[in-house]
Image (cartoon, helix red, strand yellow):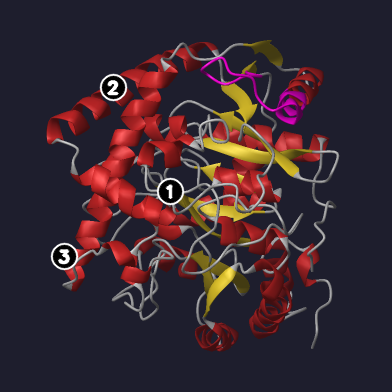
């Protein structure tokens, strides 16, 4: 039975229909598959199809196998991490192609336990390096709001799929903004949780000194909250874990936030001006927050932006070199220049030259910044910025073949001025679709809280979703 209303529901809404027997998991899976086949030629968002696994899982669920708040809901996994036994994780990289995962990641196991049904894997930039989803291996993903523009990265295929109504939520991860950037570009909710809120097992404790966080992109605050309820919490052997939470995140998203102390910034930490559309977005949102009764004033943490950038890039490039060498070691391969894009190879070579002393000093510098930002949040509950420095860029603007790593990464300075900081400090931050340009491109607003502060973010997000709803906004590629 065709279910024409499928794309109008968020994940919890679809699960409720399954619970009431108005629709079956198998029917929902077929709806997702139909939409992949319909929209993927334009979007290039799904790069690996798991239709047989999805149909088998749906059939098992219909026989009474498993429960969970997202029981029967179609889902997509990102082609970075998100390992699913028997399915390759390629990271859009020729060097990693064709190697199936031996077992599920802990996060994937928890997604399954929540009732989510993976129907495929989504497009990414090579090795997740760039904030745009363009690669030589897969080709570019296209933004459903305007096919000539970027979806953001590195979770761009996931974001495009959710924004187009293919699935209500999808796996994403974030090492420098890779949940929040695509959420901003595609008009979605994108929460980067507190460091170690979600585990990276069963093999990894953390990666890149904790820069990377795992979660989802979605169309509703409640889906984002409920998904975190399903996945968070430590597992045996974790090197550290996030602060305890006393109540479910879904309950927090339904709770009024009270009167918050909110700082906002309408320029970069370097003092450089944001794009005029981004300035308007921040100022409009600050006015909305004031009208909701919050204490709002212009301020930003007193940090050395140049030192943050330098230290972050040291850890970032070293981590990418380690990831490539780690894959090579585990699979008996030797990295060769012809197996990588120019910028990936340049970053790999640079990362291999970083001394251990420089790496550790950079970590110490980022920890110093974490102290400074932590003290800032003793005064302010929330810091508001735009997620990106400009609206979504056009595809092709960022040169993936640039072989000078400083020049290659320098292309991103004004585009991604804000998101890496929260990876360095471990703080939670959420991008919300609260503004659109005159020509219909989304601009995400980013809200950052103190370490462990997902609850206050979700309370505020729930309030803003009600005050300035985005549910009825739909891109040109939809449903």
The answer to whether residue 128 of the structure is visible from this angle is yes
- Image quarter in which the C terminus is found: bottom right
Secondary structure of the residue carrying tag 2 is: helix
> Gap in Å between the C-alphas at discs 3 and 2?
30 Å
Q: Nearer the viewer, residue 450 or 121?
A: 121
- Mark 1 and mark 2 lie on one chain; the one further toward the N terminus is 2
The span picked out in magenta is: 265-282
Residue at the (47%, 53%) spot, across then down: 400
Total numbered labels: 3
- Image quarter in which the N terminus is found: bottom right
Q: Nearer the viewer, residue 400 or 1?
A: 400
In this view, 355 is above or below 134: above
Residue, disc 3: 329
Secondary structure of the residue carrying tag 1 is: loop
Residue at the (60%, 30%) spot, across then down: 447
> In the visual, does 128 lie left or right of 282?
left
> In the visual, does 207 lie left or right of 248?
left
Residue, disc 2: 365
Q: CB under 8 Å between callouts 1 and 2?
A: no
> In the visual, does 238 lie left or right of 221?
left
Q: Nearer the viewer, residue 442 or 217?
A: 442
How packed mark 1 is, by other alpha carbons closer than 10 Å (few <14, some 14-19, many 20 or more), is some
Task: Reply yes or no: does residue 277 show up in magenta.
Answer: yes
In this view, 371 is above or below 20: above
Residue at the (36%, 43%) spot, across then down: 196
- Mark 3 and mark 2 lie on one chain; the one further toward the N terminus is 3
Residue, disc 1: 402
Task: Reply yes or no: does residue 60 show up in magenta.
Answer: no
Secondary structure of the residue carrying tag 3 is: helix
Percent x, y of residue 65:
51, 82
The answer to whether residue 241 of the structure is visible from this angle is no
- Asked which quadrant contains residue 147, the reply is bottom right
């Amino acid at each position: 039975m065709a279910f024409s209303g499928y794309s109008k529901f968020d994940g919890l809404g679809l699960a409720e229909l399954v619970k009431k027997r108005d629709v079956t998991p198998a029917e929902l899976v077929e709806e997702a598959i139909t939409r992949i086949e319909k929209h993927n030629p334009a979007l290039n968002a799904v790069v690996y199809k798991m239709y047989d696994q999805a149909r088998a899982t749906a059939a098992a669920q219909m026989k009474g196998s498993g429960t969970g708040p997202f029981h029967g809901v179609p889902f997509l996994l990102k082609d970075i991490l998100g390992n699913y036994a028997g399915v390759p994780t390629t990271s859009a990289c020729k060097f990693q192609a064709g190697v199936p995962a031996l077992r599920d990641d802990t996060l994937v196991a928890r997604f399954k336990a929540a009732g989510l049904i993976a129907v495929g894997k989504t497009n990414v930039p090579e090795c997740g390096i760039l904030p745009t989803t363009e690669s030589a291996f897969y080709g570019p993903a296209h933004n459903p709001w305007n096919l000539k523009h970027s979806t953001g990265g590195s979770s761009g295929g996931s974001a495009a799929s959710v924004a187009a109504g293919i699935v209500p939520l999808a796996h994403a991860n974030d090492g420098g903004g890779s949940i929040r950037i695509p959420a901003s570009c595609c008009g979605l909710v994108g929460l980067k949780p507190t460091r170690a809120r979600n585990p990276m097992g069963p093999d990894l404790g953390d990666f890149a000194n904790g820069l990377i966080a795992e979660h989802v992109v979605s169309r509703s605050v409640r889906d984002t909250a409920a998904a975190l309820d399903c996945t968070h919490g430590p597992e045996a052997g974790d090197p550290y874990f996030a602060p305890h939470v006393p109540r479910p995140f879904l309950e927090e998203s339904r709770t009024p936030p009270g009167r918050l102390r909110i700082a906002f910034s309408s320029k970069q930490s370097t003092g450089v001006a944001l794009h005029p559309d981004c300035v308007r977005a921040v100022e409009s949102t600050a006015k909305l927050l004031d009208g909701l009764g919050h204490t709002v004033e212009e301020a930003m943490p007193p940090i050395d932006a140049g030192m943050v950038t330098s230290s972050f890039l040291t850890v970032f490039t070293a981590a990418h070199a380690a990831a490539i060498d780690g894959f090579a070691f585990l699979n008996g391969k030797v990295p060769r220049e012809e197996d990588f894009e120019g910028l990936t190879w340049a970053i790999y070579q640079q990362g291999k030259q970083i001394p251990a002393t420089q790496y550790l000093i950079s970590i110490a510098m980022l920890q110093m910044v974490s102290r400074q930002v932590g003290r800032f949040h003793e005064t302010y509950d929330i810091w508001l910025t735009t997620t990106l420095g400009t609206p979504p860029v056009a595809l092709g603007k960022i040169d993936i073949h640039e072989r000078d790593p400083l020049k290659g990464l320098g292309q991103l300075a004004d585009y991604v001025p804000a998101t890496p900081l929260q990876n360095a400090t471990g703080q939670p931050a959420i991008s919300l679709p609260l503004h659109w340009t005159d020509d219909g491109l989304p601009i995400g607003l980013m809200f950052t809280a103190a370490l462990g502060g997902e609850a206050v973010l979700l309370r505020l997000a729930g309030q803003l979703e009600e005050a300035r709803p985005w549910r009825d906004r739909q891109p040109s590629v939809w449903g």
